[in-house]
Amino acid sequence: MIDWPLVKWEFLQTATDKGFLVKVAFGMLVGLLLMPFLASSAASFSEGSAMPSLPFAVRLVRIAVVGDSNEFVTQLQQNTIVSLMHTDEAHARELLTQRVVAGIFIVTDSSGLFVGDGTPFADFAESQVRDALDNVVRREQRAGLEVIQGTSVEPFVRGLLAPFILLTPILLLCLPIIQSLSYDRENHMYEVLFAVPIDRKKIFFSKILANLLFVGLATLIWLFLVGLVGIFFTDVLGVWFMLVLVSLLILSLNALVSTLSSNAKNATLASSISSTMVFSGIAVLTLLRVSPLVSRFAELSPVTYISYQTTGLATAFPIPTVLVFLVITFTALLLALSAFSTEKFAFSLDPGILQLYEGVLELLKHKWLAALAMGFVAFSLSIPVQVMVLGTLFFLNSKLLMILIFLISIEEILKFIGVRMLKPESLQNALLFGAFIGIGYGLSEAFLFVPYVDAFFLRSIPLFAHVLFTVLTAIGIWLKHPYPFLAASIALHVYYNSSLVSVVIS
């Protein structure tokens, strides 16, 4: 599968490109100059709480307040993510039992007492009350900002800034693959490759490997350089592996957009957009650390792991992060390979997503195997779309049910497209294609959520649930009445996810 002479040639082409190396060196120099400045700037933060300053448009939790308002209640009212209900203690406890409120704040002369029911929402509400109390006390002590109890803001901010400076050169290091692939399409080399007896998969993977080897070597040098300016890591090897993992994903995305673009200029623009989306996604995930309610999901971001290492905190290597990144990387490589090495895509006058999916089928030969791959494809495509939709709906103060409907509709529609492209000709085919697409999607989702759900049945059911939902859609396609069955699968999925949320937070 690998042509080593070609790997060596591709590697030397990149490693001896003086213009490209100058750009990389300049990017690293800027990063080295910025790191100490940003680290020292983090110390300028002072009083306040990070959570209320975040741009949330919804108040996440309700707290019942019992007693007259005091300075602590006034401070709590300034928190933009909690809402207060003033009532008597008996009514407050009734509201807590009914889960109308997440907790009760009983005001006393000196401070106050918080009562919760032990749910994640109650823990989150308690942390906000504690922050309000601490802010009042710190007002006289002039202490530093506290983002999470017991953690000052300086290492927190430094732990966020340093990884992004560390990751910035990755964008430059992953650029050669664009020229390597997009020039082949621009100069009509794809047509030439199909005219000669050459294994196109060898050419593709040799290009990927050569660029990955270059990135791995350059990243080792980069880690050595950042150590010279005082940025150290608890586990250097783990940080290096995480940087290479992110690089592999960006390389794969660059390879995909390069094979889809008609010229190198368009490929460079498309790769800039895709790389920005990757960086934005991992940034959004790592910012979840400031909330006790969702902080565990921040561990899925490689930035979170690197930031812990940057601030000297020892933490376990995030295997779930690696699995999720590998699923998305596998999908990007599969789609890029299908565009690079299949006639369905190469000889299309106006290639699009349909030819790309047809290329996957041509590449994998068997429809059931293509169906399994399309499950992974659907998951990988749904992640960035869901993040954007979730952020928009959350900002618009949407209800949880509305958010679930939109997110689930995206998942089911992407799986629906895969089944429809495979064109099941019998009930047996419909069941087979639907099941394998569901398995691919369910396995991917398991990698994402398994470490964060304790109950065994909640870890195993999602796989079977996705199989059921997709099989239902496939039956509708086979019966030539796809949309009622698609609507039914969305409705079942919404009911299932609503039940799942209720169990997790109870």
Image: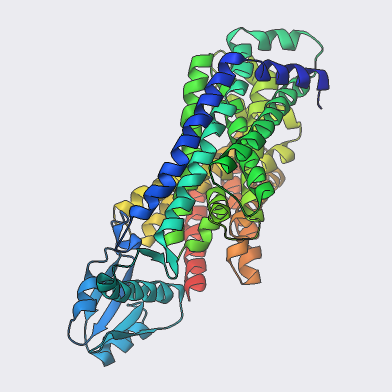
Residue 208 in picture, x, y percent from top left? 69, 27
- 88 lies left or right of 484: left
Q: Is residue 338 above or below residue 78?
A: above
| Colouring style | rainbow
Residue 83 in picture, x, y percent from top left: 26, 70
Q: Is there any visible trace of residue 467 in the rendered image?
A: no
Please give the name of the residue rendered at 63% of the width and 47% of the height, measured from the top-left corner: 239
Q: Pick whichever, 220 or 226, lies toward us.
A: 226
Residue at 61% across / 40% down in the picture?
223
Query: How many labels, in total?
Result: 0
Q: Quadrant of residue 357?
A: top right
Quarter assignment of residue 351: top right
- In the rendered image, the quadrant that contains the N terminus is top right
- View extreme (bottom): residue: 90
Horizontally, is 276 left or right of 88 in the view? right
Residue 385 in view of the camera: yes
Q: Is residue 200 above or below residue 196?
A: below
Residue 181's place in the image compared with 334, above or below, is above
Q: Is residue 243 left or right of 71 when viewed as pictured?
A: right
- Which picture quadrant has residue 477? top right
Out of 12 and 28, give the one closest to the viewer: 28
Name the residue rendered at 60%, 48% in the picture. Answer: 475
Residue 31 is situated, as x and y percent measured from the top left of the image, at 49, 35
Q: Position of residue 34 (x, y in %)?
A: 44, 38
Question: Which residue does the image show at 68% across and 34% down from the upper left?
Answer: 216
